[in-house]
Image (tube, helix red, strand yellow):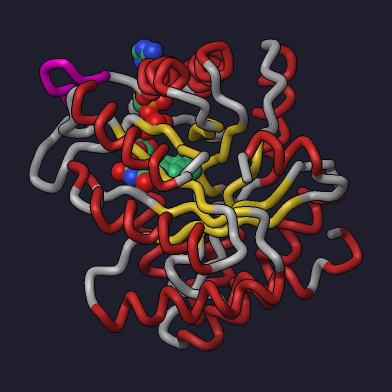
């Protein structure tokens, strides 16, 4: 089903889950097992990432097609501007249309490993805003986009830039926005209020990262611009070598965060699962009164 329809029909906040295409047979087996387990919490959609430089193009396509054909779940295919001309993108979108894939999360993407800065290829796009406009011309896809409550690391004008470009993403045809993960709900609430004041009406779905490994989150956050508040460092650092303790605290903190977000009326929660189902299911099952 189209994401726009899923969101329009929802009478309560939705849960969605993000996966990346595994590189090994074992990883692939684990992915299908996780998806089976996640059916117990009825995710509204499953999104599948697209590797830097289009490296996972075929695997992303294969997984979203199999999700659509073999599970009762609605897939969303991520798509980036990296390394692709508009003709190549049009070809891929034709494949998606033929396979019945209706939802695309349109991104600019990051430079592939070893390359400093993103650069559009000749005949390609420089920003997600352009990709979204192109997608609108290419057929009847429902389009989601990314947004950054604490600012994208390259936004010279800070969060104000992200709000301006989110408005342009909406004007160019995006149906919904999914945020970068964050741990400070107040930053999200300030961002959401500023978006509404700027005329942004599309659903803004907060991205939730359950912490399962403290060192990994510190590393990810330094790259994507998510702030780790001092209170979170203080609670996680002393137990960082004990992975079971980190996971348990990660779930406890995410439940608290999600509870506050749901009470403040968010349209859904998008879980960055890192190809695991356990934390997402545990968190969801502690929010039954709000979902
Ligand atoms: C929910 C989510 C899913 C993601 N999935 C993937 C994935 O599958 N694969 C992957 O490689 N990466 C993924 N990313 C990471 C993403 O590709 C990076 O954050 C990337 O650096 C920016 O992508 P974007 O679509 O937000 O870019 P853009 O919206 O193009 O923004 C990039 C920068 O350019 C500025 N900008 C935006 N539009 C314009 C404009 N029209 N003119 C001038 N400046 C502009 C912005 O302020 C920002 O600083 C994801 C991120 C999120 C939040």
| Dominant secondary-structure state across the stretch colored magenta | loop
Q: Quadrant of residue 187?
A: top right
The residue that appears at 38% across and 51% down in the rendered structure is 49
Where does residue 64 sit, x and y in percent of width and height? 42, 55
- Is 195 situated left or right of 140 in this image? right
**Residue 124 in magenta stretch:** yes
User: Is residue 201 positioned above or below 44 on the image?
Assistant: above
Q: Quadrant of residue 81?
A: top left
Depth check, front residue: 173 or 185? 173
User: Is residue 147 positioned above or below 214 on the image?
Assistant: above
The residue that appears at 27% across and 19% down in the rendered structure is 126
The residue that appears at 71% across and 57% down in the rendered structure is 257
User: Is residue 7 positioned above or below 141 on the image?
Assistant: below
Q: Quadrant of residue 219?
A: bottom left
The residue that appears at 59% across and 79% down in the rendered structure is 37
Quadrant assignment for the C terminus: bottom right
**Residue 168 in magenta stretch:** no
Q: Which residues are magenta?
A: 119-125
Number of numbered markers: 0
User: Is residue 96 positioned above or below 140 on the image?
Assistant: below
* Camera sees residue 160: no
Quadrant assignment for ligand 1:
top left
Where does residue 161 sit, x and y in percent of width and height? 48, 16
* Camera sees residue 56: yes
Where does residue 25 sit, x and y in percent of width and height? 25, 80
Where does residue 282 sit, x and y in percent of width and height? 68, 77
């Amino acid at each position: 089903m189209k994401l726009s329809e899923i969101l329009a029909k929802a009478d309560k906040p939705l849960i969605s889950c993000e996966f990346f295409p595994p590189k090994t047979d074992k990883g692939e087996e684990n992915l299908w097992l996780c998806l089976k387990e996640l059916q117990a919490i009825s995710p509204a959609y499953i999104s599948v990432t697209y590797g830097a430089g289009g490296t996972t193009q075929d695997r992303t396509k294969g997984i979203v097609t199999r999700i659509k054909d073999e599970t009762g779940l609605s897939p969303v295919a991520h798509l980036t501007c990296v390394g692709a001309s508009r003709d190549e993108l049009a070809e891929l979108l034709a494949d998606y249309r033929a396979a019945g894939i209706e939802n695309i999360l349109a991104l600019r993407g990051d430079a592939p490993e070893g390359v400093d800065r993103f650069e559009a290829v000749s005949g390609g796009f420089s920003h997600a805003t352009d990709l979204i406009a192109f997608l609108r011309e290419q057929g009847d896809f429902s389009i989601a986009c990314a947004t950054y409550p604490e600012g994208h690391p390259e936004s010279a004008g800070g969060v104000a830039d992200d709000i301006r470009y989110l408005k342009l993403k909406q004007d160019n045809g995006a149906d919904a926005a999914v945020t970068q993960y964050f741990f400070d709900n107040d930053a999200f609430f300030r961002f959401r209020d500023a978006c509404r004041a700027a005329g942004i009406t599309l659903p803004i779905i907060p991205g939730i990262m359950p912490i399962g490994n403290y060192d990994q989150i510190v590393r990810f956050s330094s790259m994507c611009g998510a702030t780790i508040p001092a209170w979170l460092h203080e609670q996680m650092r002393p137990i960082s070598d004990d992975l079971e303790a980190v996971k348990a605290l990660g779930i406890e903190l995410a439940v608290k965060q999600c509870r506050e977000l749901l009470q403040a009326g968010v349209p859904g929660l998008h879980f960055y699962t890192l190809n695991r189902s356990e934390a997402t299911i545990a968190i969801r099952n502690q929010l039954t009164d709000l979902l």
